[in-house]
Amino acid sequence: MDDDTKKILYVQTHGVDMPERSATPFYLAAAGAAMDAEVSIYFTMNGPTLLQKGVPEKLIVPKKGAAGENWLTLSSRPKTSALNYMSASPRSTYTR
């Protein structure tokens, strides 16, 4: 990426204990990636629990008036080439 590329960092502080709050950084990251920005999500506090083995495949993010969405589908939405995951926890094992 060149020096003119916009860079955006979102901080994911909510984890499996509050899945309804875990979706927002991914919606915003998808928007940033669509604008060709270099987007990163930093997982801290409870956020790294979303990256633990088996969680992305099983966690359902509730949607108002709908059945919800699988977290793995949600986390795969932004363009892969423009999204970086960073974690404060060495226990995080999920890779895209």
Image (tube, rainbow, N blue to C red):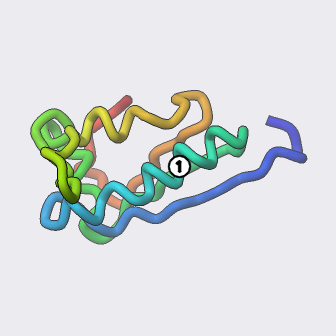
59 vs 46: above or below: above
Give the residue displayed 44% in from the left and 57% down from the top: 25
Q: Residues within 10 Å of mark 1 (few under 14, many from 20)?
A: many
The percent coordinates of residue 64 (x first, y second) are 21, 59
Give the residue displayed 22% in from the left and 54% down from the top: 63
Of residues 88 and 96, the one drawn nearer to the viewer in this rendering: 96
Amino acid type, callout 1: Ala
* Left or right, 29 with reference to 47: right
Identify the image quadrant of the C terminus.
Answer: top left
Secondary structure under tag 1 reads helix
Rendered image quadrant of residue 13 = bottom left
* Left or right, 45 with reference to 27: left
12 vs 2: above or below: below
Give the residue displayed 71% in from the left and 42% down from the top: 35
The percent coordinates of residue 79 (x first, y second) are 55, 31
Give the residue displayed 88% in from the left and 46% down from the top: 3
Of residues 93 and 41, the one drawn nearer to the viewer in this rendering: 41
